[in-house]
Amino acid sequence: MQLENIKDFITYICNTVGPRPCGSKEEREAANLIKDYLSSSCDSVVLQNFFAKPRILQHLITVLVVIYTLALISFYIYPFVTILLLFVLLLIAYFTRCKSLPVLEFLFPSVPSQNVIGKINATKKADTTLIFSAHHDSAYVMPFFGLNRPFSLFIYALIIFLIFFLLILAASKYFLFATQLSWGTDVVNYLTVTAWEYDSLLPAPYKDIINYSSIGCIVTYPVCASLNNLLVTNTPTLGANDNLSGVSVVLALAKYLSKERPQNTDVHFISFGAEEPGTTGSKVFVKEYIKNGKDKAKQTKVINLECLGDGILCVAQHEVVVSAKHCSRIINLVKKTAKEENIKLRGVKVIGGSTDAAPFTWYKISACTILRLDKWGVPVPYHTLKDIPDAIYEDELQEAFKLCVSIVKNVDKGKYCTPSDDNK
């Protein structure tokens, strides 16, 4: 690969390899091409092989829609079952997305994936390790993200409201029914009472309010059911922006540092596989990295790069859904470096989704993600068929590259890296 511009790598991979869903031969081919490219710049390059669940997030959406459907049906048969099902739905959603636990993974097959890890050694004794990372797998199309932004946010909020609304209706019916029972013989059949038996004992005003309110859940059910079609498809994207744009900057940085080596900093260049199914590649790397030396992990800083082809340049300070509040010191480093270079940079909270920086933060390794977002806080284009090389801007990539080069130089000098620098 002879590349003149940073964007050339994106175009090359999209034209010669194409979409790269997790576990596919195309993902493997892309990893090997990245390895070959890094080999010309780095002192060492290795492939880290592992197994991943390729469509676990899509399966999660389908499971949640099915549970909600059963809960709505149960409301008119056994309301107590509705309460149980909705609690199960919320627990699955919480533990899989917010706590990143493998709740459903045992149900689905595994596929091989791989991380590519390159390293350039410091010219002197290294006292810091700096990691630049991105991911080379591509997502499946999610039509939800192709909708008008305000409308898609409305749909998302409506679905969350309907889940809790149905739970409140079922719990209210259950509670009101309980107040009509005398504790003793009646309680034996408490949990198996049908909806018709509930209605026969409920006070008329409350019964009518609850039952008429439930009609709203029926009328809006197609919105919830459509979520499966809006988020689950079998069509992979080219992933030019998400996230060959990040990989291309990582490779350009490796090429630059092969000639302008840092003196006191070892620099790693990582392209993760299996990011789309839930940052699997970065989780595997972090666990292995810590196993090989906790002291080294404490001296490590991670700059993850994501969706850099178009939009407002940002640094993710907090990935809310996955509870990853990134290190303030490394965010301070990125912000002050950007200011030095006259690069406009916005600190943001990422409300939905997660990046490969999150697993590092969970394990107390200093990390953050540099990315580009639109005014609604979403990458553009994102998980759609419009995520092609033509949507990528070379000057946006160059600006991110310039920022990364300056970050390396500042880290190598120890600038903005100590507690005393935080308030400067």
Image (cartoon, rainbow, N blue to C red):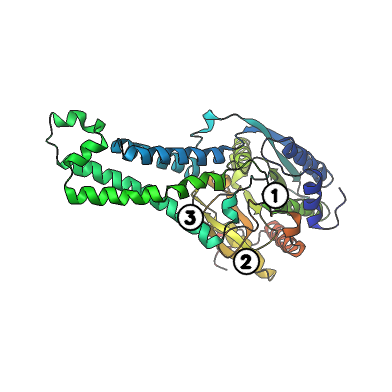
Q: Position of residue 299 (x, y in %)?
A: 62, 48
Q: SS at mark 3?
A: helix
Q: Position of residue 144 (x, y in %)?
A: 56, 52
Q: In the rendered image, which residue does mark 1 sit on?
A: 239
- How crowded pointer 2 is (Cα within 10 Å; few <14, some 14-19, many 20+) is rated as some
- How crowded pointer 1 is (Cα within 10 Å; few <14, some 14-19, many 20+) is rated as many
Q: In the rendered image, which residue does mark 2 sit on?
A: 345
Q: CA distance from mark 1 to mark 2?
A: 24 Å
Label ID, residue 155 = 3
**Residue at 29% from the left image edge and 51% from the top image edge:** 212
Which circle, 3 or 1, is nearer the viewer?
Answer: 3
Chain-order first, disc 3 or disc 2: 3
Q: Is residue 177 left or right of residue 220?
A: left
- Residue type for callout 3: Ile
Q: SS at mark 2?
A: loop
Instruction: Pick the quarter of the image with the C terminus.
Output: bottom right
Which circle, 3 or 2, is nearer the viewer?
Answer: 3
Total numbered circles: 3
- Residue type for callout 2: Leu
Relative vertical location of residue 272 with respect to residue 263 in this rendering, above or below: above
